[in-house]
Image (cartoon, rainbow, N blue to C red):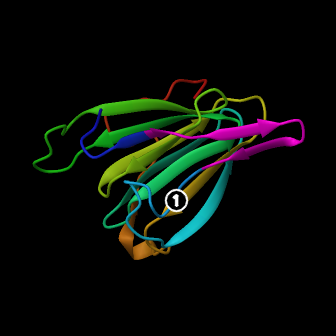
């Protein structure tokens, strides 16, 4: 597990009409502040990444579909520097993943339909605060398989 990354199991309350899927409450131990909530749809087999935020904490959950989330720690002085963490999020793996700043993130769609990734970020989006790299950037030691 990468230092500072927290995986929190989330509640789903089901009845005959459907279900309620919890994500994040302000009284949660991982909640720090609210910046914005956005949703990212990812097609089957598509890859989104690499992204790293300077100050923003991410809070990811996948209420529809399934993804593989990949985290890479290249922080100077981190106890887990150089580590890679892979997580399944979505159907059967309904969790909130809290990701501290300066962790590279990427994900791929694993379901047979577009997956929906929700992010409750601690800051509003600011392109100057984020860094992006290509999915095959040699400075990030992870290689995506042909199936994502």
Asked whether residue 72 appears in the rendered view, the answer is yes
Q: Decide whether the magenta segment is chiefly helix, strand or loop.
A: strand
Name the one closer to the observer, 140 or 82.
82
Which residue lies at the image location 67% right of the left edge and 30% below the top edge? 91
Density class for disc 1 (Cα within 10 Å; few <14, some 14-19, many ≥20) is few
Q: Quadrant of the N terminus?
A: top left
Relative to 5, 9 lies left or right: right
Kind of element beneath mark 1: loop
Name the one closer to the observer, 84 or 118.
118
Residue 34: % across, % down: 47, 71
Instruction: Look at the picture and state if 75 lies above or below 95.
Output: below
Residue 146: % across, % down: 58, 24
Which residue lies at the image location 78% right of the left edge and 35% below the top edge? 113
- Residue bounds of the magenta highlight: 8-22
Residue 21: % across, % down: 68, 46
The answer to if 16 sits in the magenta stretch is yes
In the rendered image, which quarter is residue 74 located in?
Answer: top left
Residue 141: % across, % down: 31, 33
């Amino acid at each position: 597990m990468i230092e500072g990354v927290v995986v929190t199991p989330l509640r789903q309350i089901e009845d005959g009409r459907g279900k309620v899927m919890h994500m994040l409450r302000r009284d949660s131990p991982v909640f720090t502040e609210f910046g914005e909530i956005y949703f990212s749809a990812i097609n089957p087999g598509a890859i989104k990444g690499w992204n790293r935020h300077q100050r923003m904490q991410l809070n990811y959950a996948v209420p529809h579909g399934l993804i593989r989330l990949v985290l890479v720690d290249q922080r100077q002085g981190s106890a887990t520097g150089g580590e890679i963490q892979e997580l399944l999020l979505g159907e059967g793996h309904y969790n909130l993943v809290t990701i501290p700043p300066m962790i590279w993130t990427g994900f791929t769609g694993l379901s047979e339909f577009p997956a929906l990734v929700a992010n409750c970020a601690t800051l509003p989006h600011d392109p100057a605060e984020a860094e992006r790299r290509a999915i095959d950037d040699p400075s990030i030691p992870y290689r995506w398989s042909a199936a994502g």
